[in-house]
Amino acid sequence: MTSHFSDRKDDQPSQGDRAREDARLVEEVLAGNQLSFQLLVERYSDRLFSLARHYTRNPVEIEDLVQESFLKAFRRLDSFHHQSSFYTWIYRIATNTILDFLKRRGRSPIQAVEDPEILVQSEPIDGFGPEADMEREEIAEVTRKVLAELPDIFRTVLVMREFEERSYQEIADMLGISIGTVESRLFRARARFRERLLKDHPEFSPGGGE
Amino acid sequence: MIDPTKFTCADARPLVSAYLDDELTADRASPLRQHLMECAECRTATQSHKAQRQWFQTTPPVEVPAGFASRVARRAFQGDLGEAPFQAAEDDRVLAPVLPFVLRMTAAAALLLLVISGALRSVEIPTGGELRADDAATMTLEAALERLERLDREESALSEVRSR
C-alpha cells in the first residue's frame, strides 16, 4: 500500500540527492553528453529566468541573458569543482552576466562605495510601506525603478533576500562573501532603498501627501 | 558577550535588519530584544523596517520558452560562445532616425540618374572637329534645361512612332 504521507513535499528530491544528480550530470557533460547538459539547463532555467526578470522586463533580453549564462557555464564546466552546489555556481555566473549587460547597455555607473554616513537614525521612523490602495503592479513598478537606481552590490543582495528569500548563508555562498558582509550589506542596501524611495516618491514619506 | 545594560540605540539599529530576517544568533538577538522592550523609538524603527518589506512582493514565475533547454545545449556543443548578443540593437537605435532620410536621398539620386541617362541616349556625341569645348562653358543653366526638355520631347515622339 502506498503511503500518502511523506516528510518531503511532493516528490522533491532532497538537497543531497539533487547535488549528487548534478554532479553526475556535470561529469556526463564533460564526457561529451549533450543531453545531460540539456537536463541541467531544464533543471535551473526557470530560476535563472526569474532572476533575470528582476533586472530587466524585456523578454528577449531575459532569454538572451539566461542563455549566455548557461553557455558561459558550459565553457567553464571543467573549473567547477563541486565546492558549492551547481546552482550556487551558475547563479553567480548569471548574476555577473546580468550586471555586465547592464553596464554595457549604458546603465549609469554607480560606484559601490562604503557608506560611513549611513548611521543609525536617531529620529523614530514611521511606516515606509506602500499605501493601502496601491495595486500590486504599481507597487512592483515603484520597487523595480528604485532598485534600478541602486549600486549593483546593494541591488543584488536585496533581490536575493527580498524576492528569492535566500538565507544569509546561501547569499554568502553565492556571492563568495562572508555572512557578516551579507548582514552589513543588506542593512546598507535597505537604508539606501529607503533613501531613494523617499527621494523619488516623497509622497510615501511618513505623513507625506496628506 | 554583549552587556545588555550598555546596549544603546546605536548598537540596536544596525541589528534590526538581520533580526527581522531571523538571522541573528541568540547571543546577539537577546540584548536587542531586551532593548526593544525598553526603547519605544527603536521599536518604531523596527516597525518601519517591517513596513518597508511590503515593497518587495514576490512576482509570478517567468515562463521558460518551449525548446529553450535543447536550443542552449545544441548551441553549447556547436561551440557557440554566446557573447555580445545586444550589439545589433544598439546599432539599430543609432541608425533609426537617419535611415528614412538616407533612403529618400538615395531614391532621388536614382531618379536623377535615370533622367540623365535617358537624355544622353538621344544625344549625338560630337566627334573630332564637332566637339567644341566652349559649348558647356558658355551654355547657361536655362539653355541646358531647354535642351533637356527638347530631347525629352524628341524621345517621346520617337517612342510614339515606334509603338504604331
Image (cartoon, grey):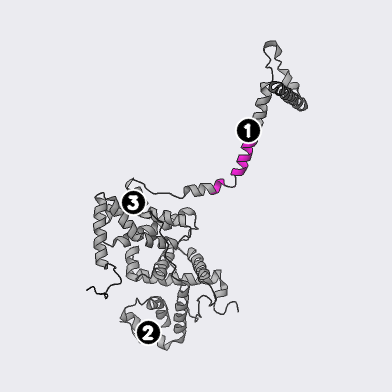
Q: Chain of mark 2?
A: B
Q: Front-most of A108 and A78?
A: A78
State left or right for residue B162 relative to residue A81.
Answer: right
Label 3 sits on residue: B73
Label 1 sits on residue: B110
Disc 1 and disc 3: Cα gap in Å?
48 Å
Q: Front-most of A111 and A107?
A: A107
Disc 3 and disc 2: Cα gap in Å?
52 Å
Q: Secondary structure at mark 1?
A: helix
State left or right for residue A169 relative to residue B43.
Answer: left
The mark closer to the camera, 3 or 2, is 3
Image quadrant where residue A65 sits: bottom left
Label 2 sits on residue: B33
Task: Tell me: residue A31, above or below residue B131.
Answer: below
Are discs 1 and 3 located on one and the same chain?
yes
Q: Position of residue B83 (x, y in %)?
A: 40, 49
